[in-house]
Amino acid sequence: MKMPKKRRDVEVVILSDIHLGTYGCHAKELLSYLKSVKPKLLILNGDIIDGWAFSKRYFPNSHMAVISELFKLMKKDTQVIYITGNHDEFLRKYTDLRMGNLFLTDKYLLELDGVKHWIFHGDVFDNTTKGGAKILAKLGGIGYDWLILINRAINFLMESMGRPKVSLSKKIKNSVKKAVAFIADFEEKAIELAIDNHYDFVICGHIHQPADRIATSENGSVHYLNSGDWIENLSYLEYNEGKWDLCFFDTKNYVEEEITEKSIDLNVEELIHPQIFAAFTEQMVPAD
């Protein structure tokens, strides 16, 4: 009989930009990671479920298994802070709702070992997620999802020929000056506000760019962290013994397991607050 692996104790884990409900989401790898840890505090920093793409047509077992595992962690006394992002903004009308070990909010102030952390998704700095530009952003999100699918097909061929993987989206971002400038501007704004408010750390998501650096200005300094994403980078943050680590899932040692409906121990309607469950179902595009 195969014995389950013992979970690692972790003080804090931060995940962002998982985008459940999209083709680009690496749900199986994330599930493998979640089953390997036992965090005291798990912070989901936005864009966990992709409300912009949420559809009855595509929400496979592996994506539902991730949600199931999150609830299992909560049952095992993991405190979960769900910070809403632009892709799951439909949950923002329930900000500051608490359900057992789950707390839903739009930003979070955390003090660890006497050190102040300001944690938020980051779309507040992105004008493309607001007003009329939001429609273009949603269309861009669909295009991004297809780009990831095409990229996976290319990488399958590259690996079969013994050549290294490539990231089309990273190449596009790095070659387009506006994209590079946006990322720099995003980080600069987050850092500036954190310094002005005398925070020691500022932790974001949104831009799918993992980061760990100390930024200094004439007004002071702050430690900037970005947890990245589970589309391209498969990155996350862990906090133990007074230290943050920016980590990346090791795909080389990943062993894929079959996920079936029977293996998913989850009745969403029983576990989720009725109003929030209604909010999720409102996002679904009716099946043809």
Image (cartoon, helix red, strand yellow):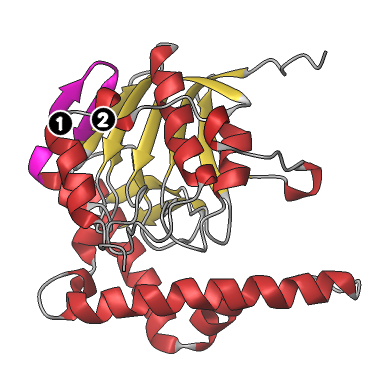
Residue 271 in the image: state x and y as whole percent: 28, 24
In this rendering, is residue 277 above or below 147?
A: above
The residue labelled by disc 1 is 274
Q: Is residue 116 visible?
A: no
Magenta extent: 93-104
Residue 100 in the image: state x and y as whole percent: 24, 16
Secondary structure of the residue carrying numbered label 1: helix
Q: Nearer the viewer, residue 45 or 241?
A: 45
Give the residue drawn at x 38%, y 79%: 181
The residue labelled by disc 2 is 269
Secondary structure of the residue carrying numbered label 2: helix
Residue 103 on the magenta span: yes
**Mark linked to residue 266:** none
In this rendering, is residue 265 above or below 179?
A: above
For disc 2, the neighbor class at 10 Å (few under 14, some 14 to 19, many from 20) is: few
Amino acid type at mark 2: Glu
Q: Is residue 199 visible?
A: yes
